Each structure stands twice: as C-alpha cells, then as structure tokens.
Image (spheres, rainbow, N blue to C red):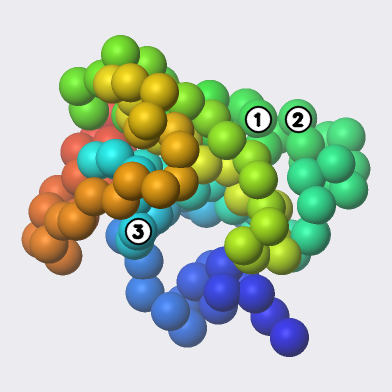
Amino acid sequence: MASIFTKIINGEIPCYKITENDDFIAFLDVNPNAKGHTLVVPKKEVNKLFDLDNDLYTKLMSFSRKIAIAMEKSIPCKRIGMSVIGLEVPHVHVHLIPLQNMEDIQFNKKDKFTAIEMQEIANNIANKL
C-alpha cells in the first residue's frame, strides 16, 4: 500500500508544496514543530534512509541543503535543524526545522497556522530558491 507521502506525490492528498524535481518533493509539515517546518521526500518510496542507493542519498542531502538555505533566508531563526527519524511513516523523509532553541527540534511541541499562513510560508520559501 502506498505511503501517505506517495499519495501526496501523486496528488491524491494536497500539500503546501515548496518545490519538486524528478526525484524529490519538499512541502510544509502540516503538524509543524516550528514555522516553516519542511519535509523533503524522495519520490521513490523507500522505507529506510540508509536503504537508499548512494546516488539518491547524496541527491537527497543536496536537495535538502538547497531547501534549508532558502528557509534560512525566509524564516527568522538561529539555524535550520535536520532530523531523520522515519518511524512514523515508512517512506524516507528529512525534517528541516527552523530553530530558535533545542525544544524546536523535539517532536513534542507543535505550532498551528491557518491554511492561508501555511501557503504564504511555502511561497516565501519557494521564492528564495
């Protein structure tokens, strides 16, 4: 069965997309730790990060870096944190989270934004690419 991320990639579930290419998609996390919390997901459905082949793994890190740089230009923060946990969805994904403090990277704090705010955040990041 397709993961929720595959359904987003296929357009079956909407998202606040920042950008995509042939291999990856970046979109806002709908349950964010902080304003701008972004997920970077390979379009190829692979369960575990280290099961990606070397080329796709390297491209994932490069694509994530590009998104993180754009995020830093558009979201006031001390830095962009990266987390790869992968237990909640069996599809590789990188969390890019704007950080003000260590609590922002922990997954027990969630921020709420309206749909309009989410779209504005996504557009702001996309415009910095």
Q: Is residue 112 above or below residue 101?
A: below
Judge depth for marks 2 and 3 and give the one in front: 3
Q: Nearer the viewer, residue 97 or 73?
A: 97
**Marked residue nearer the N-terminal end (3 or 1):** 3
**Residue found 73% across the figure and 86% down from its top:** 1
Distance from Cα at disc 3 to Cα at disc 1: 23 Å
Residue 92 spot, x, y in % from top left: 69, 53
Name the disc covering residue 109, or none. Answer: none
The residue that label 2 is drawn on is: 58
Residue 87 appears in the rendering: yes
Q: Nearer the viewer, residue 32 or 66?
A: 32
Residue 66 appears in the rendering: no
The amino acid at mark 1 is Met
Judge depth for marks 3 and 1 and give the one in front: 3
The residue that label 1 is drawn on is: 61
Horizontal placement of 86 versus 99: left or right? right
Name the disc covering residue 31, or none. Answer: 3
Disc 2 element: helix
Residue 103 spot, x, y in % from top left: 37, 30
Residue 118 spot, x, y in % from top left: 20, 55
